[in-house]
Amino acid sequence: MKEEFISVEDSLRALKWRAPADRVLERSLHAALAARREMAPKRRALDLIPRALRLPLAACWTASLAFWWLTPKEQTSSATSVAIHKSVPDPASLVAQQESTRQLTHELLLALEDHGRRR
Amino acid sequence: MPLSEATLIRLHTEYALMAFRFAWSVTREEALAQDVVQELFLRLARGTLRVDGARSERSLIFRMVRNLALDLLRRGRVREDAASRWAAELPEWFEPVAGGEEEQTQRALTEILCLLPEEQRSVIHLHVWEDLSFREIGELLEAPTQTVASRYRYGLAKLREALQHLETVLL
């Protein structure tokens, strides 16, 4: 540095910067801390998930939602039991039903014979 | 991810005063400097400005302060060459000194510093009062070291002229 500038530099260094009032800087710290506290709860839930897992987890959730939406609804358990009872009848009731049909057929044939004789 | 409360307090303790002085130097207005410091720490708290991973935290803070200050000046449309305004209303940057020659020297230096282009004033501020080397200043102003040194020399030459003029007046 040239000597001619050194005296100017010294004159500048001799000047002491005026400190601001304490409250000026305190206010900026309080505002920053308040802003930080406002930010924190919004991000807390997301912060629990490691950054590397966020994208794969989001993809899994989206896929599971798509499957749930596109898959036909399953039958309830009561509907299923009704269907089972309808399609597999009880053998005893089948025998009773067959016997009743045979009885009615016999009675019908007798009635027809009786009717033919009368004519 | 916002800064932890402890980190925010540490940054404020270490850099708030330094940031305020530099912002005041750039803007020349105390109220604007307060706004710059407030905005700086709000952005750090919200994570929109970050210091993690910086090679020099201090230099990064200076760069942020300068950018915020210049943004504020642009928004406020404060004219850099408003010489008449600054001649009438000098910023009270420095501790007052007892009258006489010392006071006149301080006034002359303040007046010339105030009227210097912002680039020269910032270089002088960072080199004289914050002890940054020309290389460090060049990095934070994104300018070659030679350019920074030239700005410093031009600035000092104007200040020297002012002091010489004052000497002739006093003699």
Image (spheres, rainbow, N blue to C red):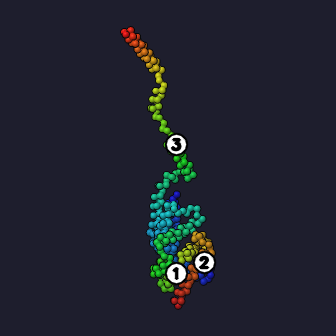
Q: Amino acid at mark 2?
A: Ser
Q: Position of residue A25 (x, y in %)?
A: 47, 68
The Cα–Cα distance between marks 3 and 1, rounded to whole angstroms, is 73 Å
- In the picture of the structure, the residue carrying the numbered disc 1 is B112
Pick out the residue farthest to the bottom. B171
Q: Nearer the viewer, mark 3 or mark 1?
A: 3
- In the picture of the structure, the residue carrying the numbered disc 2 is B150
Q: 10 Å neighbourhood of mark 2: few (<14), some, or many (≥20)?
A: some
Q: Nearer the viewer, residue A102 or A3?
A: A102
The Cα–Cα distance between marks 2 and 1, rounded to whole angstroms, is 17 Å
Question: Could you tell me which secondary element the residue under label 1 belongs to?
Answer: helix
Q: Amino acid at mark 3?
A: Phe
Q: Nearer the viewer, mark 3 or mark 2?
A: 3
Q: Chain of mark 1?
A: B
Q: Position of residue A41 (x, y in %)?
A: 47, 55
Q: Residue at x 58, y 82 (%)?
A: B157
Q: Chain of mark 2?
A: B
The Cα–Cα distance between marks 3 and 2, rounded to whole angstroms, is 68 Å
Q: Position of residue A114 (x, y in %)?
A: 38, 10
- In the picture of the structure, the residue carrying the numbered disc 3 is A67
